[in-house]
Amino acid sequence: MALVRMLVLSLLHVSLVGSQPAKTSQQPSSTPNPAGEQSPLGTDNLSFPWSRLRLPRYIIPLHYRLLVHPNLTSLSFTGSVQIQIEVQNNTNWVVLHSKGLQISKATILNQNLGLLSEQVLPVLHNPSHEQIGIFSPWVLSSGQKYFLYIEFGAELAEGFYGFYKSTYRTSAGKIRTLASTHFEPTSARTAFPCFDEPNFKANFSVRIRRSPEYISLSNMPIFKTVEVNDGLLEDRFATSVKMSTYLVAFIVCDFKSVTATTSSGVQVSIYATPEKWNQTHYALEAAVKMLDFYDEYFNIHYPLPKQDLIAIPDFQSGAMENWGLTTYRETSLLFDPLTSSVSDKLWVTMVIGHELAHQWFGNLVTMEWWNDIWLNEGFARYMEYISVEATYPELKVEEYLLHTCFAAIGHDSLNSSRPISSPADNPTQIKQMFDTVSYNKGACILHMLRHFLTDDVFQRGIVRYLRKYSYKNACNQDLWDSLANTCTEEDFSSGKHCYSSSQASKNAYLFAGEHLDLTAIMNTWTLQKGVPLVTVTRKGSHLLLKQNRFLRTVLPSDPLWSTMQQGFLWNIPLTYKTDTSSTTYRHLMTTHTDSVHIGAEVSWVKLNSDMTGYYVVHYEDGGWDEMAKLLRENHTALSYKDRTQLIHNAFQLVTAGYLPLNKAFDLIGYLQLETHTVPLLEGLGYLETFYGMIEKRNELDLVHNLGMYILRFFHAVIDQQTWSDEGSVSERRLRSDVLSLACHLDDPPCLKRARQIFEDWLQSKGTLNPPTDVAEIVYSVGAQDDHGWASLFHAYNTSLSSAQKQKILFALTSSRDTNKLNRLLELGLEGKAIRPQDLSFVILMVARQPRGHHLAWNFVKKNWSTMVQKFQLGSSDIRNILIGTTGQFSYPEELADVKLFFESIKEQAFQLRATQVALENVQKNVRWMQRNLETLRNWLNEKNDVKNS
């Protein structure tokens, strides 16, 4: 015993750390016991050999042979995995990931599949790191390959991660069960023991056992089905390409599918519950188009023979990009022409575009570690816009990119933001990387880079990146090198990393006359947090430029402001237009102050043309008055994107203390002339936000005056709207938003028409669906009385359309009856009538209500532990709940209450960036009210005086 313990201690130092080669050859380190006797190597004699969160690098997995058998009656599963490993340092230990699995057997075999030892191998557990260590009495020799064989079992998970159970109800009322997986980022280890880090790529051969009434799906096609004991069938899937563990997927269900083939021969199938099969056809059309587009755009064929897309009834996020088997929420994949609106169609199209982009960005080339998850998510978010614009131009997806960047700026102008590339070690930290910064800011800096380099150079660069790192892992620097480096002669002749047959120009990357250090430029956008503010002052024929960090929570007059500016400097690709030329001028700003010559004859200058740059612009010394004058007199001199950006920047500068509120209101005074949906909704959106915050305060006169002003100012636009599904996508989007606000503000004609359509729907017993663009408005107005609410709740429970259910659920939360709102919250927590996946939506929708915002917040405080258990601490649901329920608090007392609650959950709050975001948002709101409430009151009084005079 003592000898064994001494041997283990020496091995911990020698072979695990790998500081020197182990001196022993492949011989047993203790004499094997006679057959049938238990090894003396009990776990009591061993201590866990590894102390770090990241796995050791001296054992590399090559190939997993995985067998899984879920039992949908007992809601459990058993399985086995044989992992071919390559040893790079002599060792007696194999350390890998496992969480919540009962390990019943572990053995190690040599290359010829012979057992190294008849002994039962000890398995040690380190639950805090979600790791197991398997001790081999034989030394595993450097340079050799072995097979690690493990048998395991567990319950199917509750919730949305790992190998979990999901259910659905048929129209006959029968509950059906399925089992599905969601592994990203760190949950493959809960389904089978594995090396669960993105850079441990391997091949996977999957077998699934099932009853004949079910089907099974995995990343690859089935090549053979055999009958095993007790009438069970075993589906054997083709071996996968080399991929990360988080992309593995397997599902056992009774779904139906529709199938088509891409022009390159890839079989595409859409799966859904049998009664929703007729809602899969649009997704099939979109997926085929998208795969064909990406094949051409990336100049790299999709490498698998099939691509399945499946709508899972219980699903936490929007979708997941498992290679060859992408999984979706039903609202993200299914389209019902009778109840899905044009916005629903756009959402489905964009989500499919996002997940299919991942088949290249993320699956083919994977980030080295989770600190660079933006290389997956930022690219996929940006490719949504490129792919949908190319395949469905009528959806006008480019109109939404601005709001993606506005959302990023909103988050990034808080001190609690983070750099795009940030450290993330444990699972909670890793989950939090899937946020606005990775997705939206990532997409926006790629958009800026694309315009900076030109479309063609950008496309060639990313294709070079994808080709060079196919089936490998990459980091930030690899992307910059691929974008900046022209082809070498070797690359050119081999065709490996060149996009076209002609070699790229050595001078393709010139900007403002100089060759650029792209790494230095882009590091200022990915390695430091925040968004720059460019302040512009006109001085004769020159523009004087100054850059600072843009902060909405600390005023320039605050002593902290200068401290928070220290060390921040961006390389900003400035663009600008003037009235004297249609040219877009360019200038790279690399210093805190700068100037550009524009000529004395120029009367106006607009920076950040079409908002291709990720920065905010402040026009000093009367510059905003000039912009307001230009919009009043000739607003079409600027593009709709420029007009929208001016409105956004102005109101952001009000919050940050650079601009008085009345100046921003002066700027949007021109909107009565505006005919484009995007700037119109941008201005309307700010007024709606102010109204939403003020109606939660004891300011009845102010609420009334602001509501009346909005209705009066936009009456022409409101009156133009029809209660139909006619018109272009932009017109239909405008209709939905404008009529929704009008009814929310109790506009009598709006309410009257909505009630009429709702009554028609009731009379038809739900067979006469409202026009899809206004259905949510109609249901919301109808939900205000008891009979309407009860009728909608019944329809919610019986509808087979996920799009309709979401509209009805929104309407149910619009009730002004707090008992009904409380009931919805409790039903969401219970998880039967309202699925757990929709609980966060219910909480946020109740919180938007004047009578619901404290109700929702108190509900969160009361049920915090339950929700963390349901959703996991670092998840997007927890983040959205914390930020969403507090997002419109604006009293100091509310801020104190939020602080008090976060103090009571200090240990968890310390791990969450969302708590700091929530606090900063409330602080921002409190300051906004203190600085702007009287200005708003006076401004509205002036407008009313003008109206009444």
Image (spheres, rainbow, N blue to C red):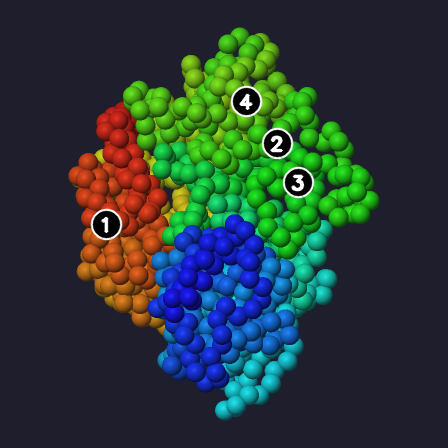
Instruction: Give the mark toward the camera: 3 or 4.
Output: 3
Q: CA distance from mark 1 to mark 3?
A: 45 Å
Tag shown at residue 590: 4
Res 116 → quadrant: bottom right
Q: Residue furthest front?
A: 3
Res 23 → quadrant: bottom right
Q: CA distance from mark 4 to mark 2?
A: 12 Å
The earlier-in-sequence mark between 4 and 1 is: 4
**Does dot 1 land on a helix, a strand or a loop?**
loop
Looking at the rendered image, the quarter that the C terminus falls into is top left
Q: Amino acid at mark 1?
A: Ile
Where is residue 867 shown, x and y percent of the image?
Answer: 29, 59
Q: Is residue 40 left or right of residue 890?
A: right
> Disc 4, disc 1: CB below 8 Å?
no
Q: How many marks?
A: 4
Tag shown at residue 905: 1
The earlier-in-sequence mark between 3 and 2 is: 3
